[in-house]
Image (cartoon, rainbow, N blue to C red):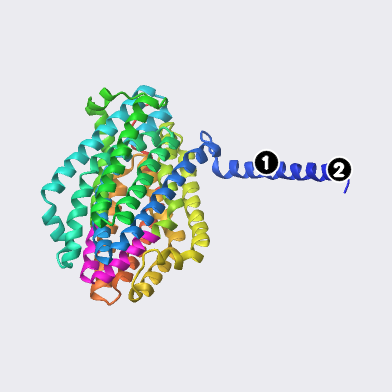
Amino acid sequence: MSHHNQDGIRQRMRRRCFLARRQAGRLADRLLSGETVQYRQVFAILLPILVDQACIILLSLLNTAMISSSGMAAVSAVSTVDSLNLFLLNVFIAIATGGTVIVAQYKGAGNRDMTEQSAAQSISAVVLVSLAVCFLIVLFHMPLIGLLFGSAEPAVLHNARIYLIGSCITYPFIGAVEAVCGALRGVADTKPSLWLSLITNSSYVVFNLVFITLLGWGVWGMSISLFLSRFAGMLCSLVYLVKVNKTLHVRLRDLIRFHLSMIKKILFIGLPFAVEQMFFNGGKLLTQTFVVHLGTLAMGANAIVNSIVPLFQIGANACNLAVVTVVGQCIGRRNIKDARKFIRVFIGLGSVSYIFTILLLMPFLPWIVRLFSPPAEILQTVYFTIIMTVAASPFFWSTSFVTPSALRAAGDSRFTSIVSMSTMWLLRVVLGYVLAIVLPFGIVGVWAAMIIEWVVRSVIFLLRARGTKWYKNVLVEN
């Protein structure tokens, strides 16, 4: 073939690629852009959060797989204590989310001074709350262990006590990291929050490799790793915010000055969400006690499912976080049309991402399960529970979680909290008890009750989003 023909072919290919990119850009602009937010801005916010969520969940999976080398007693203890850790971490995140909403709305309104002040106050509030929770957990750790593990084996109780105390000491560290990341997400500066999360979570894996895999310290090693990694994350977060960041000019002295009017605005969003998270995750903790009654093998199976299912939620979780920033900024500009559109956009993206991860991960599910070295007796239960949950998720997870996050970004925190708490306790807890304990479905019943709760939440929140009451709370002035 002559050089002339080869050049012609290359030019035609470049031309086709150019036209395909332009057509894709037009399609993305039509589907994913609004009047004030363009699709490139949406992806700039979403992609770092997506990578962040992928790293967090994958690293958590690896850590659970590593601790499984210490036996089912260690896995059961770590899994159940991590349910309490998640319960409390979500309280810190809830208050930080209040800060994210206020920061995003001030950013949308173009008020730089109040944007920076709200960021500083959010960080201070989260750290103070986490310090108070740390003190209370250390003081009352024995009654908590008795509540969570009353009928568990002695080996599980011993490991649980070590890991519970080791975890709670790190609450102020992870609280600071989450608050800084939340403030950065509020101004759509998501890349630094990605790096801060990567530093915290990747160092956790490295320390676990040393203390668990190489030295064989088991739960002690995991506790030490958690302390070191979260302390490093806190230091990096504060240094970045004070010394490096150019978007938010926050000084150390700003973190110890309290502005009650700003704190009230943050808590107006954060406290109902925090109460919601306490009741929501408290219900999840209560369902863990159902599993404890089913025995150590059931606890181990539940721990494995709890570690694998979030792999499929990576994209949807990223949409759940990103929607707060985008809708919050739309509401700050009082552009309700854009806010409505981006609620639909992120629900759609969350569902599509779920389908993509299912197609990507399901062929590797047997290999993923084998990472945990599960006993043969629980394999069937593990597979069935994962497949059942994953099959329902594209239809109901995004509508159940992304929608209330968007409503909360507009200031509709009271309604979303009441609905979430009601469905949790009436459906996931009560129905979960009936299906798991009264009826012979075990942990499958616990997860089936959760799916039913998603369906009910979806209906209620979608009806709310179609109305007008959700954007009536004015939190910031233009």
Q: Please tell me in which quadrant of the rendered image residue 245 appears.
A: top left
In percent of width and height, residue 396 lies at: 42, 59
The residue that disc 1 covers is 22
Q: Is residue 424 magenta?
A: no
Q: Mark 2 falls on what kind of element?
A: helix
In percent of width and height, residue 274 lies at: 25, 45
Q: Nearer the viewer, residue 355 or 221?
A: 221
Q: For the magenta stretch, what is the residue range? A: 283-308
Q: Nearer the viewer, residue 284 or 376?
A: 376
Work out which quarter of the rendered image holds the C terminus and state it.
Answer: top left
Residue at 32% across, 35% down = 99
Residue at 46% across, 35% down = 335
Q: Mark 1 falls on what kind of element?
A: helix
Mark whose residue sits in front, 1 or 2: 2
Q: Please tell me in which quadrant of the rendered image residue 182 appears.
A: top left
Residue at 39% across, 60% down = 309
Report crowding for label 2: few under 14, some 14 to 19, many 20 or more residues within 10 A (C-alpha). few
Q: Nearer the viewer, residue 166 or 18?
A: 166
Q: Is residue 173 above or below residue 248?
A: below
In this rendering, does residue 463 appear at all? no
Q: How far separated are the C-alphas under marks 1 and 2?
A: 28 Å
The residue under label 1 is which amino acid type? Answer: Arg
In percent of width and height, residue 262 lies at: 27, 29
